[in-house]
Image (cartoon, rainbow, N blue to C red):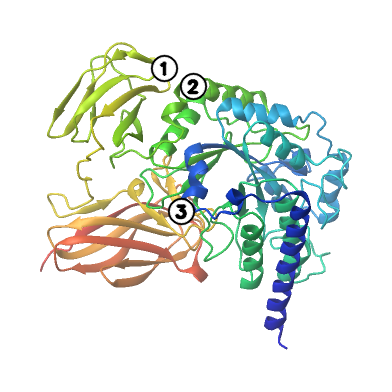
């Protein structure tokens, strides 16, 4: 019997045993009703998540004892990566647990704050890359109950409190990286490790911990995998299968591994400028600069930015998972609490325009604000979130519809006139804004929205095609990948070699085109450019700095007839290094 066959048999035995034991335990305590046994569709399973729109992410661990500093020096990157960035030996890092005692942590207060902010679900790091389990792990003594003086299972406390306060609860779990276990990936600095296989780590630690999290903590709504690596298909299958078998209604993200898309796409730190093609997606973003707690992190986003980020994701049909980072005492910084309460104050009177909404029916992103929508009695109800309110100005909306009524969400007696023309509907603003961050105007239509055609990207009067970075679409993001960075007006943080970036555009004057774009990066890299059935591999030279951009010619491509086309850029996997990229330009080649 070969090793592959043995692995498959072991995987099958482990799964059957875990599921059988779980089923027996559940049967002793509960007899399922017909309603519980009934299978639900993916749409029904995703319904609560799609309606929620807003959740709380929590990064917390023993790294908070260092608070971003090691040997008196600030370490780069987020605080939860300090073991890696500081190259801290396992034996030394373990000692942090001896003093980790967050006695000020209060699950009720924590969940109450999330609820006050208007959040509908919560996801917390059960185990991050450092390998420390923030729950009473039966697979490892390196956990918050056995290794710390705190001696309490915070995940169990949060799970119970979320159930009481009707907040959906879920876990983050680093399935591939584990810098503490000899089979975990990511630790390349501690030479004392006596290496074992990644499979052994999964079967010995990750799989039993995942099973425990899904059987001992009640209904788990979300399992949030992180940083996929090259693992054997058998172990990834094991993790996926046990998750869906033990909690069939669970929702997972797209970071388990290649070919495991999960239930929703994940954007990190920066949301898409335009609505993604995926039906379900989520932006996760820290409330300050760092995911985990750093004592020197005072880079908190303003309340206005946070509220508008929530509105922005909702207007494109996505969710907003806002991260907070407790200290080693178990509390949040005052700045975080202040902002969460301020978001809650806005949501308290405007949540109708967020919960249960759909993406804007128009493809345009208004410069005056954002639009969300609901369907009521087969009629469109639009919520106009006005950022730039000007008395006696008009809000243009690219819809050809008759208007039933238009009024202020918080005061229906305050109505607004509307006009229509061949460019759509105009809502005439009058008076002062009700809210300086976002004033919500309700626009009720007499039927479903009839949007004007999208202004497709195409050629200008000189035959040139400019494909802006903010109009790019993305595919196959496994972990942090390519996404639009509004601050730099470029596709930034392109770290993932599996992230494809593409644009769709129209050609009415066929030609031979020279394609170019501006890039920046600290190392040489290679990409594959594809257009009209032709692919070319291009070397992108380093510029020495991510802020320094240089124009690179991407080759000539022939388009011989009018129509719609797609240009795609994909990393060459074994020759890939992170880059930033600005607009792509298709310039007609002059005839001789």
Is residue 487 depicted above or below 106 in this figure? Answer: below
First reached walking from the N terminus: tag 1 or tag 3: 1
Q: Are marks 2 and 3 in contact (CB under 8 Å)?
A: no
Q: Quarter-wise, where is residue 239 in the image?
A: bottom right
The earlier-in-sequence mark between 1 and 2 is 2
Q: Please tell me whether residue 524 is drawn above or below residue 145 in the rendered image.
A: below
Q: Nearer the viewer, residue 8 or 74?
A: 8
Judging by the rendered image, the residue that carries numbered circle 1 is 435
Residue 178 screen position, x and y as percent: 72, 58
Q: Position of residue 34 (x, y in %)?
A: 60, 51
Question: Element at badge 1?
Answer: loop
The reply, left or right, for residue 279 in relation to residue 31 is left
The N terminus sits in image quarter: bottom right
In primary-sequence order, the first of circles 2 and 3 is 2
Give the structural element (helix, strand or loop) at label 2. helix
Disc number placed over residue 63 in the picture, else none? none
Q: Which mark is residue 482?
A: 3
Task: Name the residue at 47% across, 20% down.
Answer: 349
The residue labelled by disc 2 is 346
- The residues bearing labels 1 and 2 have C-alpha atoms spaced at a distance of 9 Å
Residue 561 horizontal side relative to residue 297, left or right? left
Q: Position of residue 471 (x, y in %)?
A: 33, 48
Q: Is residue 396 left or right of residue 276?
A: left
């Amino acid at each position: 019997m070969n090793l592959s066959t043995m692995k498959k048999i072991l995987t099958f035995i482990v799964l059957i045993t875990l599921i059988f034991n779980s089923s027996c335990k559940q049967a002793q305590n509960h007899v399922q009703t017909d309603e519980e046994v009934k299978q639900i569709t993916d749409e029904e399973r995703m319904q609560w998540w799609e309606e929620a729109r807003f959740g709380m992410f929590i990064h917390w661990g023993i790294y908070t004892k260092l608070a971003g500093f090691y040997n008196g020096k600030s370490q780069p990157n987020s605080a939860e990566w300090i073991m890696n960035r500081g190259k801290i030996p396992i034996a030394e890092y373990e000692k942090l647990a001896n003093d980790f005692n967050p006695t000020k942590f209060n699950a009720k207060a924590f969940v109450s704050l999330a609820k006050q902010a208007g959040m509908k679900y919560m996801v917390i790091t059960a185990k991050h890359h450092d390998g420390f389990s923030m729950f009473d792990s039966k697979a490892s003594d390196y956990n918050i109950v056995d290794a710390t003086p705190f001696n309490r299972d915070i995940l169990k406390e949060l799970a119970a409190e979320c159930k009481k306060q009707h907040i959906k609860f879920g876990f983050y779990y680093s399935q591939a990286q584990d810098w503490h276990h000899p089979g975990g990936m990511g630790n390349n600095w501690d030479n004392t490790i006596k290496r074992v296989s990644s499979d052994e780590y999964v079967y010995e630690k990750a799989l039993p911990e995942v099973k425990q999290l899904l059987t001992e903590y009640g209904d788990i709504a979300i399992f949030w995998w992180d940083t996929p690596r090259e693992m054997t298909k058998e172990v990834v299958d094991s993790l996926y299968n046990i998750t869906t078998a033990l909690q069939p209604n669970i929702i997972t993200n797209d970071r388990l591994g290649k070919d495991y898309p999960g239930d929703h796409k994940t954007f990190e730190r920066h949301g898409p400028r335009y609505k993604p093609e995926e039906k379900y997606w989520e932006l996760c973003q820290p409330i300050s600069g760092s995911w985990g707690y750093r004592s020197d992190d005072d880079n908190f986003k303003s309340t206005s930015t946070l509220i508008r980020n929530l509105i922005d994701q909702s207007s494109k049909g996505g969710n907003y998972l806002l991260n907070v980072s407790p200290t080693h005492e178990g509390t949040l910084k005052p700045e975080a609490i202040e902002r969460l309460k301020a978001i809650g104050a806005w949501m308290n009177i405007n949540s109708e325009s967020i919960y249960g909404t759909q993406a804007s029916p128009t493809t345009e992103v208004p410069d005056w604000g954002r639009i969300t929508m609901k369907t009521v009695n087969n009629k469109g109800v639009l919520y106009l979130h006005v950022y730039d309110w000007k008395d006696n100005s008009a809000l243009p909306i690219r819809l050809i519809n008759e208007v039933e009524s238009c009024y202020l969400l918080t005061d229906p007696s305050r109505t607004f006139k509307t006009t229509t023309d061949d460019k759509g509907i105009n809502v005439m603003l009058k008076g002062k804004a009700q809210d300086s961050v976002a004033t919500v105007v309700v626009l009720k239509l007499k039927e479903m929205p009839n949007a004007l055609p999208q202004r497709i990207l195409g050629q200008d009067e000189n035959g040139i095609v400019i494909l802006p970075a903010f109009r790019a679409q993305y595919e196959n993001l496994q972990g942090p990948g390519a996404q639009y960075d509004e601050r730099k007006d470029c596709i930034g943080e392109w770290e993932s070699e599996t992230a494809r970036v593409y644009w769709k555009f129209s050609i009415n004057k066929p030609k031979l085109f020279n394609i170019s774009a501006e890039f920046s990066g600290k190392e040489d890299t290679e990409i594959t450019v594809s257009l009209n059935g032709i692919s070319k591999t291009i070397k992108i030279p380093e510029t020495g700095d991510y802020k320094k951009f240089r124009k690179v010619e991407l080759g000539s491509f022939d388009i011989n007839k009018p129509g719609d086309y797609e240009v795609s850029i994909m990393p060459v996997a074994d020759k890939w290094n992170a880059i930033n990229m600005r607009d792509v330009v298709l310039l007609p080649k002059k005839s001789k």
